[in-house]
Image (cartoon, rainbow, N blue to C red):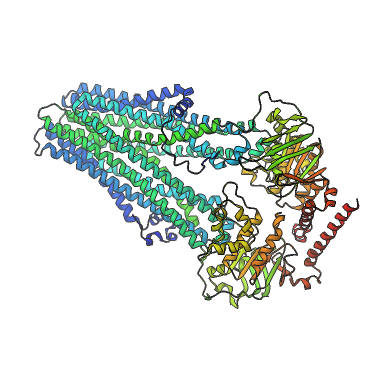
Amino acid sequence: MSTPDQVLNYDLKNAVHPNRLIGLWRLITGFRLHYTIANLSLGLAALAKTGTYLLLQYFVDHFFVQQDAAVHAGIVALGFLVLAALEGGFTFISGRLAAQTAEGVARRLRNYLFDHIQHLTFTYHSQVETGELIQRCTSDVDALRRFFADQAIGAGRVLLLFTVNFIAILQLNTRLAFISIVVIPVVVIISFLFFRKVSKAYEAYQEQDAVLSTTLQENLSGVRVVKAFARQNYEIQKFEQNNWEKFLRGKRLLTMHSLFWPISDTLCGIQMVAGFFTGAMMAINGEISPGTYLAYAGLVVWIIFPIRNLGRLVVQMSTGMVSYNRVCEIIRQERESLDEGDYQPAGNLTGSLMFKNVCFRYEEGNIALEGITFNCQPGQVIALLGSTGSGKTTLVNLLPRFYDYTEGSIKLDGVELKRYPRRYLRQQIGIVEQEPFLFSRTLRENITYGIMREVSQQQIEGAAKAAAILDVIQKFPKGFDTLIGEKGITLSGGQKQRIAIARTLLKDPRILILDDSTSSVDTETEAEIRLALQNLMKGRTTFIIAHRIQSILSADLILVLDKGRIIQIGKHEDLIQQEGMYRKVYDIQTRIEAELEKEIANVGAL
Amino acid sequence: MSVHFEDEDFDQQKSLDRKTFRRIAGTVRPHWKWVAGFLISICLVSGLDSFFTYLSKRILDEGILAKDVQALTSLLTLYGILILVQAAGVYAFIYLVGVLGELIRYDLRRKMFNHLQELSLAYYSRTPVGWIMARVTSDTERVADLTTWGLLDASWAVMNILTAMIFMLIINWKLALVVLGLLPILLWVAIEFRRRILAEFRLVRRFNSQITRSYNENITGVRVVKALGREKENMREFSALTSEMYKSGFKAAWLSALFLPTVQILAALAVGTIVWYSGVQSQAGKMTIGGIYAFVTYITFMMWPIQDLARVFAEMQHAIASAERIFNLIDLEPDVKDLPGALQPASIQGDIIFKNVSFGYDDDPPVLHNFNLHVQRGETIALVGPTGGGKSTIVNLLCRFYEPRQGSIYIGNKDYRKLSLKAIQSRIGMVLQTPYLFSGSVRENIRYGRLDASDDEVEEAARLAGAHDFILRLEKGYEEPVGEGGGLLSVGQKQLISLARAILAKPEIFIMDEATSSVDTLTETQIQKGMETLLKQCTSFVIAHRLSTIRRANRILVIEEGKITEMGTHQELLRKQGKYYQLYTRQFRHQMERALDPFEQSSAA
């Protein structure tokens, strides 16, 4: 049952095909033999079942009617056992192989999608909704699993049972065979129509279930609002409405079922009785032997009743097909390669950069950056100033090649940036966002996240200390083993940022990107963050996205951006002399201090 | 009180608690007519199933072999009629059991939801939302399934086996005893299988939710993943997870695939015995052809009732555990509730006094110690200080979301425990730091403040809150849907709407927890304006972050470690140059920077 790596690592891009049936067939590459045998075994199991009835025919005719049996009854008894063993054995083989296929395909899909998604571009990620993506990776993959595990194989079973047993009855008596299937087309059509309708009713039921869940969830999450306005009765009414609607839809669904099954039962039953009557008359008239009648009576059940499920299987299979399309839409996206690039230095970068006329344009053609030209030496601090949407973030996103510049040139240590593999660049660049994303793992795991080497506890503590977060961590009862997101454990924005700083210290990158626009009020810790950041910036080429003068004063180069262009460039001392945006920002700071003094003075004068 | 929220899927093997059992029966009792109805119809259907085989036997023996066409015709006519009767039975049981199932689900959900409305905030703060959701959704599902389909399947199975045994005994009692001997073995095998399959399915479910969580994290954290180049490691972790899932899923599937064949082969043993026995015996002429047919059919089809019995039995334990959790929830007493004879005054205006109040959450160390405060009617109190200092706790106590451990709170000279919860809470207007809206339109959300408000009043409240203008700019104006939890609106917009909601409520006490997150300057000015109205009308408590709010408060309280460390007007405290002074100057710089940001202005222009 272990799956070879080559099957596991099959590139599912090949399974994307405009013809869904071909696509589905390609999806089970590596499992085709399994799946084919699974279906063959089903046929063999059906044959064994048929054999049981034929053996019954032989037994009755030769032991009872004519009493001319050439074998001992024990042998016939053994025959029944063998046939049952064969039927059971093949059913099991079929089930096991189908499960192996379905589970294997699902596992491969899950892995592929996971890896695929983390390799898709930022452009893609900024366009899609998380919930939708997750839905496709879970529910749709599961729908495909069921397609192979139950539906395709189930439909195969129904058809094989029908075929094998119908042929067997044909062998017994042609007329009887054709009389026995009169009603079948009707049953198939009714079943198909019914299940198409019922699947819609079921969807409606599920939709209402989602509505009800949302109502409940909102009530629970908004419990403070509910209580603050004493709206319990209103909430009860609202829930009651949705709850009752779900009941009604469930009732509708069941009413449909309660009609379909007796009606199809009746149709099939009448068909069976008609067959029995014809067969019985034939047996009385001596056209067929009692044993033949007996075999017929047994076989006919297997061509009539299973067929009722065909409609269900076909309808369900069509939802599997829809899921295939939805999954393919993700697979079809191009990955960004981590290794593409022909220049990979053995050691670390030094961190000198030359931007020359760099331009970045989104696929739709909107310009995000234009004519960006500047140089910086290793270890320098470059501050970026500008409004939201001025291009600050886009500019720094070019460095780890989250986006590739569309025109101009960026030289890193004298080599064109695009020649570096993304993996190497990202190893050399550290990013500390303003409110970093932390994973629901322990603090330790978050701090060592992405660090590709063994890290000792001492190193972790050292980094945490330098990031001014050690005290906070040690205050938690479980220390570094505290799970983020666990009950009661919430970190403030500033604390999260310091975790990210510790992580980046461990990573020890040559180039640093800092988002320093502290907009959240975490006033007590501002000084600590500042200290932590200073520790971090030592000896690294640093890009700071900043709003505030304090963090810019000491920068080696200040870029003021507006609408994707550099409108001012230089050092603080130079820029302060010029008319322009920078001076405005600076003036405001002085003005604020003046106003504050004035206000305090006013109070004192009272 | 410690509750395990994680592993409810892995219930201990619980002894069947008779009390729980009786209560489960109690939830069904009001519908006993439905239950009786579906039980009768399923027994009819099940009995007829066995009878059909018996009829087939008679058709063979009395019709075909006896060459009696008349007997044949009448037997087949009976067969046909009974098919119609059975169809009626099938209709009745599907309808009755199905609709009853929905009804019980509906009923349980309603009971739980209604009870949840009464539980105190303390319960909500220690119980994850997802856990409660699972109780209301999956646990009700399981209990309803057990009491309807489970009961039905079990009855069908028992009836089917019983009637088949009776007919077999009639046909040939010796052989019937052989089958009877085999039955317990079949049942035991089936139940063992089912248990193992069920256990694997539970594992699958658990892995599935872990996988979903991994997807979620990796997608929302994709920036970090890429920046840190952790793709390979993530993939390794994830594929370990999918391998586990594969193992469980595969095992569950092949166990299921093995289950029926095993039962089938065991049944074939019985068939073999009968064939061998009757083959030898036929010379003696004791067993008829029809008899053999009947036996073979009975035994072959016996695996279905056995499978059903095993399923119901295996799932029963979990359903009972579910029921227990449901009953525990329903039995839970709210921590805060009305005292008998609680007063319902029309107004609760008056001074608010905290007298020697001490309080802590759950068993945690106290947050407030011996807290005293006298607030005059109409005063505006600004609470400032570090996070975790106790500001929110003061507000929570005032709203009576929690009650003091020691000491008392007086509203209008009455110990507020003598008032009804509704009397207090319906007179409070509240704006939360992270404003919460319910899915629905803007109008519906504002109207939440006062349900009988007219459209004009809603709009007037929005105008006072400064929300009217932005609402009109929305595509559908007041009918614009706000999305789940208000997700379609910005934080600032949500704040304005929740302000309008509070204004509409015409409260006597106003509580606001100001947002720390940034909203644009224009929205902020509007929020200030909206607050004006309320601050003028009410006795107000504001957990304040904005300078203007702080400045215009009658009194400012600096709360640290559960105590008031400084108290006074803005001027008084500023002069003191203490804690407040530090807080204020920092906040001043911060806010001015944002207000004067030249970039904001240029992008707005």
Instruction: Give the tally of numbered discs.
Output: 0
- Judge from the rendering whether residue A584 lies leftward or rightward of residue B88; answer left or right: right
Across and down, in percent, residue A582 comes to 77, 67
Instruction: Name the residue at the right extreme.
Output: A605
Q: A391 or B58, which lies in front?
A: A391
Residue A5 vertical placement versus A287 (above, below): below
Q: Can residue A152 be seen in this view?
A: no
Q: Where is residue A350 in the image (x, y as percent from the top left)?
A: 60, 75
Residue B13 x %, y %: 41, 37
Residue A533 point in image, percent of width and height: 66, 64
Q: Nearer the viewer, residue A405 or A388?
A: A388
In the drawing, does residue A336 fall left or right of residue B529? left
Q: In which quarter of the image is residue B118?
A: top right
| B599 shown above or below A310 | below
Q: Give the side of residue A516 with respect to residue B7, left or right.
A: right
**Quarter-wise, where is residue A397 in the image?**
bottom right
**Can residue A421 be seen here?**
yes
Toward the viewer: A213 or A193?
A213
Residue A387 quadrant: bottom right
Q: Is residue B360 left or right of residue A244?
A: right
The residue sitting at the bottom extreme is A414
Q: Nearer the viewer, residue B573 or A113?
A: B573
In which quadrant of the rendered image does the N terminus of chain A lie? bottom left
